[in-house]
């Protein structure tokens, strides 16, 4: 329950970069909302986000995610900021630091992400 169909993840190889970024943003938005509300669909969205990120990285197109740092949606900013740590930390870190200033679950996630990144333990499969 709540997992994306295998085709939702498998078809990332056929999608264009713009479509992948749009799907990443949509899944990150859903994940952020599910995280805040405690909905069980968050895991399925995280699986999709990870699959899309791996595909973008394999194409060396991760930078296509950078405009998402400016989207007025904390869940989208959090995911894009975390992934940006791998290829553009100077852009991802400030976004996560700003999110970490809050007092909600999104802020907690941002704090943990930054802590793990700064300790050298954050890895993206």
Image (cartoon, helix red, strand yellow):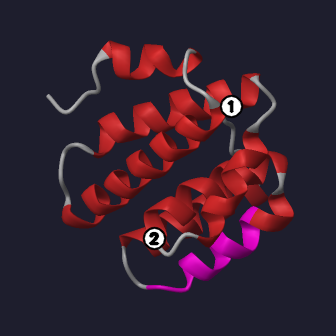
Q: Position of residue 77 (x, y in %)?
A: 56, 65
Q: Where, by quadrant of the figure, is residue 66 drawn?
A: bottom right
Between the residue at mark 2 and the residue at mark 1, the CA separation in whole angstroms equals 21 Å
Residue 48: x and y in percent read: 43, 32
Left or right position of 63 against 9: right
Secondary structure mostly seen in magenta is helix
Based on the picture, tell me whether residue 50 belongs to the magenta stretch.
Answer: no
Query: Is any part of residue 23 visible from this angle?
Result: yes
User: Does 69 sit left or right of 85 as displayed?
Assistant: left
**Mark 1 burial class by Cα count in 10 Å: few <14, some 14-19, many 20+:** many
Determine the residue positioned at 72% across, 47% down: 64
Check if residue 101 falls in the magenta segment. yes
Q: Which residue corresponds to mark 1?
A: 56
Residue 35 occupies which quadrant of the picture?
Answer: bottom left
Figure check: 107 above or below 54: below
- Quarter the C terminus occupies: top right
Residue at coordinates 36% horizontally, 22% vertically from top-left? 8
Few, some or many residues within 10 Å of mark 2 (<14, 14–19, 20+) = some
Residue that appears at 73% across and 75% down:
94
Work out whether 83 lies above or below 47. below
Residue depicted at 50% across the width and 60% down the height: 76
Residue 124, given in percent of the width and then of the height, sits at 66, 35
- Tell me the SS state at disc 2: loop
Q: Secondary structure at mark 1?
A: helix
Q: Nearer the viewer, residue 111 or 53?
A: 53
For disc 2, the marked residue is 73
Read off the magenta span: 92-102
Residues 114 and 76: in front is 76
Front residue of this view, candidates 3 and 106: 3
């Amino acid at each position: 329950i709540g997992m994306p169909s295998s085709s939702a993840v498998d078809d990332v190889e056929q999608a264009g970069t713009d479509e992948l970024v749009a799907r990443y943003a949509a899944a990150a938005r859903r994940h952020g909302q599910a995280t805040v509300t405690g909905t069980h669909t968050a895991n399925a969205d995280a699986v999709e986000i990870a699959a899309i990120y791996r595909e973008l990285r394999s194409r060396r197109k991760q930078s296509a995610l950078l405009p998402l740092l400016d989207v007025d949606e904390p869940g989208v900013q959090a995911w894009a900021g975390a992934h940006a740590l791998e290829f553009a930390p100077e852009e991802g870190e400030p976004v996560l630091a700003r999110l970490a200033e809050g007092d909600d679950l999104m802020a907690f996630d941002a704090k943990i992400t930054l802590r793990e990144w700064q300790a050298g333990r954050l890895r993206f499969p």
